[in-house]
Structures are given as structure tokens and as C-alpha cells.
Image (spheres, helix red, strand yellow):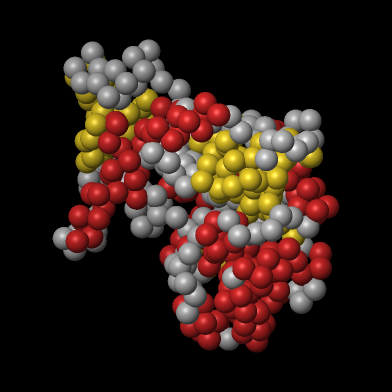
Amino acid sequence: MAGGSGERFWPLSRVQRPKQLLRLADPAKSLIEQTVERLSPLIEAGDVLIATAPHLVQPSQGVLPNLEPAQFLAEPHKKNTAGCLVWVAAQLLAQDPNARAHTSMAVLAADHRITPDEGFRATIEAALDVAESTGGIVTIGIRPDRPETGYGYIEAESSKPAIGTAQVPIRPVRQFREKPDRPTAESFLAQGGFLWNSGTFFWTLDTFLRELERVAPELYTAIGDLAELLKKGDHQAAADRFAQLPSISIDYALMEKAEMVFVAEAAFEWDDVGSWDALDRSLAPDGDNNVTQGDTLAIEASHNIIVSDRAETTVCLLGVDNLVVVVTDDAVLVAPKDRSQEVKKIVERLKAEAKSKY
């Protein structure tokens, strides 16, 4: 899934260059490049599909030149993650009427930081094995290391023995919990048995369709309609049919209502790289705990995030701490690091003031 806008990484992230196309966890590779590369050799490159927005197809192809044009699926409208996966399922059925009988899906985000790759592949393999052997749905949970309020949580059924592997224990899900306030997050951490929801899913196509038919018949019917229209090559009619769908997340539409859901505990470190302060967890700091990209200079300044994306421009800080400073060709951001989640407010104000060039 690679259709996100990444507004919290403004001004580096823009409409034509959102978060997944930025180098936020590796100085040499974008997040989406890392996502595709870490799948190999478990999943062949030819079995990778990039679900994205129409205006992001070309930029995505630019950073993933080894994938064929047919592997980029442009959703005609923005309909959240449930809509995204309805579109993908319809595409699979349009290409192969028997896909339901033999297809398994790993649904991954294009903009997460994950390490090591070997642990990620081991987790995917175990999750797919359980999804295929049980006919259930598997998601990946991350063992929390702090009382994070920006993530949803999954409570595992710890009273039952784990399946999966010794490296990747997999248990039934007791319940999904929304993003908590600080006291609730602290209680989750103290209780144990709670994992961060990574937004990563595994199922057979048959299970996906069967569960949608039971809990979200509107989406199930749409998949059949869309597959028929796509098979006929009537892309405008398919786009019009897709436009009728509600905008809803796959968590609300399916995961919280599905009958048999398991959670695999990740055998890797994870970060959803949600805002500028995530760079503290993604990139190596200097001696003063500043994280920098591009031509920068910091004197008597510490714990800052400093990014220069402007050629021949040196960004210099003196005597300041805990700031985010980002300079691009046409915009500058200066904000306290602990308010980096609020950068989206700037984007909203720019939209309201019709400053679309930014």
C-alpha cells in the first residue's frame, strides 16, 4: 500500500513526493525501495503489486525501475485502506478468474522502517503459513518499548498456546484497541500481552472474500462488479463504481469483525516513521545527538533534526536544542521536536489559503 501523503514530513514531502518516496530510514534508499528489496528472496519481484494513487504511479516507477508497469495499480479514487484492498482484489480476479482458489496476500505498508530484513521475512513466512493452514487472518504485532499513544494496540489471547514458530509466536487476537491516551498506554505496557498494531495483514484471497461477504457485503459485491468491468476493459465504469464505495479503513471494515484473527509477534524492530521525530530512531546521530541530512552545521546545539534538501545551501544552527529544521528549495520549517506530529496543521493552512504550489 503506497498511496499515503505523508503530510507530517512537509516541506520535504509533497503531493508528488510523499513519505514513501523519501529517504527517511536509509541515506541511499527511499522507504518504498527498502520495502520491496527486503521481500527478496521470499517473495519474487514479479509477485509484488504497488497499490497507489494515479498521480504517484510515475514517481513510484521512477524509484522501482525493476518492476513492470502492470505491477502498479492506480486506485481511481482515495477510499482508505479498505478501498485499496477491494481494488487490488478486483484486479487479481479480473486477471485470473481462478485467483480465489490459489492466491495468498501479504498486505504491507510502503513506508515503515524495519530491521533486520531476515527477521521480517521469517515473520512473513510464519504468518502466511498460518493464514493458509487455518483459513484465518493474521496481522503482525510489535512488542512495545514505550507507552506510545500514536499507535493502535492488539491484545493477544495469552492463555492459549502459541502456534507459528519458536522465532515468531502467533496467538489468537482477543481484541483491537484504538490509539490510547497516555495513562491507558502505560497500563497496556504494564499488563503485558499488548502489541502495537503494525497495519500489516495476511490472508488467502478466499478468506478475504468470504469474510467480507459476511461482515461487509457492500465491499464484497463491489469486488465482483469491479472485476467484471475490469475484465471487459471498461475502466471508466470501474472508476465510477469504485467512487460509490465508502472511505473506511480495513481495520473497521474487516479486522475488528472477522471470526478468526491471529497476531504474529514480530521478529524485527519496527517504526512507522510517522513524523520528523522518528528520524531520531531511524538515523545515526552525531556527537551532540543531532540527526542531520544534507549540508548542515550545528554549534553548541543538540538533539536537533536538521535537513537541507537545497543544493548549495548550508543550514546552520547555533545554541538551540530539540528543534526540527528543514530547508527545501521553496520552503523552510522550524518547529519544536515535540510538536512534530502537528506539522500537518501547516499543510492544512496552506490548502485553506490556496497556496497549492507548496
Along the line of sight, which residue is nearer the eye, 338 or 144? 144
Residue at left offset 48%, top offset 83%: 240
Residue at left offset 43%, top offset 35%: 184
Residue 350's quadrant in the figure? bottom left
Left or right of 239 in this view: 38: right
Along the line of sight, which residue is nearer the eye, 247 or 280? 247
Q: Quadrant of the N terminus?
A: bottom right
Residue at left offset 36%, top offset 18%: 289
Give the number of marks.
Answer: 0
Residue at the left extreme of this rendering: 353
Q: Is residue 183 visible?
A: yes
Q: Is residue 278 visible?
A: no
Residue 42 image point, x, y percent:
75, 44
Residue 3 image point, x, y percent:
48, 58
Q: Quadrant of the C terminus?
A: bottom left
Residue 97 vs 342, above or below: the answer is below
Residue 136 image point, x, y percent:
74, 55
Residue 229's quadrant in the figure? bottom right
Residue 219 vs 146, above or below: the answer is below
